[in-house]
Amino acid sequence: MREAPWFRDRLAWRLIARSYLPLLAALMLAWEIAHAPLYTLWREAKAAYIAFSIVHCTLGDILIGTLALALSLILLRERAVAGWRWTRIAALTVVLGVSYTVFSEWMNITVLRSWAYADSMPTISLGEARIGLTPILQWLVVPPLALYLARTARRERAG
């Protein structure tokens, strides 16, 4: 008999809800605070709006990070958490997060002009689009780190 899929594994849900999500939230909040000065709103907006923007973006990051992980687990057909292929899960989560972020940055900077980069924002060119480097780095660093820390915490509790 095959093992049940990850979404029927209580340990998987516990790991996601009690470890990955809180870690992801804390790390995303820290990142959003750290790179806020690289956007024009840092100098143009009032403190309350900056705080709102940081909270709003952090909540969006948590949603994107959660959906990227869930989609990764589905696409990779993961089973119980004990058999997770962590490197593959982290890699696909990163690909999904970066892909969405590149689209979102392009849409909000170039098309909608919802926000703008400060001159201090390092950027990379993707065709005609200029995409901020720190939003991309955020997705290369934060989700794999949150997964690593969640896995480490799980091992410590188990052993």
Image: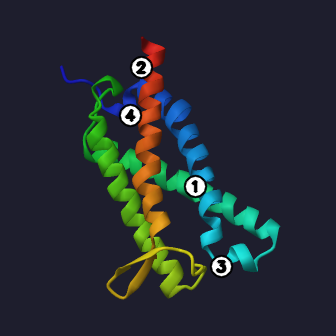
Residue under label 1 = 31
Specify the amino acid type for callout 3. Answer: Thr
Q: Residue furthest top?
A: 159
Q: Earlier in the sequence, mark 4 or mark 3?
A: 4
Q: Is residue 50 above or below residue 147?
A: below
In the image, which is nearer the foreground, mark 1 or mark 2? 1
Instruction: Tell me, for residue 118, which label it has, or none.
Output: none
Specify the amino acid type for callout 1. Answer: Trp
Residue under label 4 = 7
Q: Residue at x 65, y 79 (%)?
A: 40
Disc 4 to disc 3, C-alpha distance: 41 Å
Q: Position of residue 103 (x, y in %)?
A: 41, 73
Q: Is residue 108 left or right of residue 143?
A: right
Q: Earlier in the sequence, mark 1 or mark 4?
A: 4
Instruction: Tell me, for residue 155, which label it has, or none.
Output: 2
Specify the amino acid type for callout 2. Answer: Arg
Q: Is residue 10 visible to the viewer in this orientation of the structure? A: no
Q: Position of residue 102 (x, y in %)?
A: 41, 70
Q: Is residue 72 above or below residue 131?
A: above
Disc 1 to disc 3, C-alpha distance: 17 Å
